[in-house]
Image (cartoon, rainbow, N blue to C red):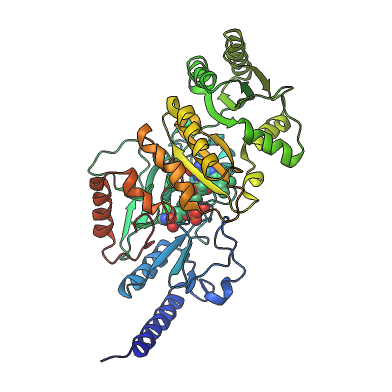
Amino acid sequence: MISEQKVECMQCHKTKELLKALAATVGPTGLLASDALVSRATSVWNPKPMAALALIRPKSTAEVSAVLRLCHQASQNVVIVGGGTGPVAGAEPSSESIAISLERMNRIEDIDPVNASCVVQAGTCLQNVQEAVAAYQLLFPLDLGARGSCTIGGNIATNAGGINVLRYGSMRGLVLGLEAVLPDGTVISSMGRLLKNNAGFDLKQLFIGTEGTLGVVTRAVLRLFPKQSARQTAMIAFSSFEQVADFLQLAKLKLGATLSAFEAMWQSYIEEQLRFYQRRSPFMDRHAFYVLIETEGADEELNKLALNETLELALGKGIIADAVVAKSDQERQRLWDLREDLEPFVRNKPFFGYDVGVPIGDMPAYVGIVEANLRHRWPNSVCHTMGHIADGNLHFFIQPGDVDAFKVDCDEDVYGPLKQFGGTISAEHGIGFEKRSWLLRNRSAEEVALMRSLKKALDPKGILNRGCVFE
Ligand SMILES: Cc1cc2nc3c(=O)[nH]c(=O)nc-3n(C[C@H](O)[C@H](O)[C@H](O)COP(=O)(O)OP(=O)(O)OC[C@H]3O[C@@H](n4cnc5c(N)ncnc54)[C@H](O)[C@@H]3O)c2cc1C
């Protein structure tokens, strides 16, 4: 009989051999050993040093393929690390896993104005793509608060949404083609630039929104749009959520395709921002709800006129209580800071964050139930709410006001009532490790079984992002 110690020793030897082979594959600067990771935070949400056997930093698709082949042969668990901005712990390696980062695959390979597309490596930061294509009067419309840190690979793996989904859709619709490496090292290249391609299955969709469980995305062809030169930004105040919903309908009708953002904030969200930064409110009075809207068009005067007419019409109909329109880039930025700066909500621990989805008409009832649940559990709790509500997406930043509070209890209060409204536990961040136990309560057994079958077919040894999405 082999003793436990001997098994451990054999395992140790296997790991050492694997690390040696990986180092030979990616070169001396391509592998950071575990002791070199002490100064690297696990993610933007988790400041603890990254734990992993090693962090592998390939420089090409061929290297990613060779790394995965070695790990597959050794049945070694691999965790894909992007910008580390995802809040569901999907990119947080354990001390038994090999972490793989595409940070050295961060090149924009090609910008093609004629076909309105660009080819980028998956480790490229989102903001770099936005800025590079802007030089060609083109727009890559995915935009979110973490733009300066998140990567295109992470955006694809999470099917990221953000502030322009209303007009341009989420990442799924912005990827024309992609290249991915399967867990056994096979490279799948679907790098077409075509908007329409129905020749067989649309394989790229396998890797969009599947949180790195089916393959490592290495390159992508992204869809671009003409950059509109005229932009208008306004903050609007409302006394009820019904008014917010009515105004959304009116704005869609009157502003049409120029309406690019519609970001709602509940009173406590704005007031915490103002209090924390000692900022002045854009309004004289307090209001129950605030919405930041943005329009983008080709003609400055027409764009301005359309927004002003819409606001006047809404005022006349009594749909809105007040409105301010930004008159400069600085004023615009000040309004966006009120929406995007999350520091006031995440600085105090514990805090619990959520990205649920609920049909817009049901939002007041659902939020009311969540707030009542929280008050009942933690009388001193505060729930700051905002969201991309035109996409049916709400974010909660919950401060329980109780140092012994547990997230599992909060999950019950937030996720529990979703079913009666046909809501989702994730409108944009995914499942990761944080929401696994809720997957079966939110999706049917048949849906989850099919997800598992796909995982098994593409990753029979379960080496890639093991434990992410599924228990
Ligand atoms: C301030 C702030 C605002 C945010 N706002 C939004 C928002 O409006 N909308 C939104 O959708 N999200 C938002 N997020 C969440 C986050 O930014 C997104 O989920 C983003 O897409 C994650 O990208 P990343 O590169 O940081 O990925 P990571 O967090 O590193 O990873 C996320 C997942 O993708 C996998 N992954 C990473 N790279 C690859 C790859 N190359 N191939 C395969 N799998 C990969 C990881 O294993 C992990 O499971 C926000 C986050 C912050 C901090």
**Residue 210 visible in rendering:** no
Instruction: Give residue 317's quadrant in the image.
Output: top right
Apparent side of residue 96 relative to residue 234 in the rendered image (left or right): left
Q: Which quadrant is home to the C terminus?
A: bottom left
Instruction: Give residue 442's quadrant in the image.
Output: top left
What x and y, as percent, mark residue 100? 46, 65
How many marks overall?
Answer: 0
Above or below, 396 against 55 in this view is above
Asked whether 155 or 343 is in front, the reply is 343
Asked whether 355 or 229 is in front, the reply is 355
What x and y, as percent, mark residue 425? 41, 43
Q: Which quadrant is home to the N terminus?
A: bottom left
What x and y, as percent, mark residue 447? 26, 46
**Residue 93 visible in rendering:** yes
Apparent side of residue 218 relative to residue 378 in the rendered image (left or right): left
Asked whether 195 or 313 is in front, the reply is 313
Apparent side of residue 371 relative to residue 158 in the rendered image (left or right): right
What x and y, as percent, mark residue 64? 40, 65
Instruction: Give residue 69's quadrant in the image.
Output: bottom left
Asked whether 120 or 281 is in front, the reply is 281
Apparent side of residue 206 relative to residue 397 in the rendered image (left or right): left
Above or below, 227 against 45 in this view is above
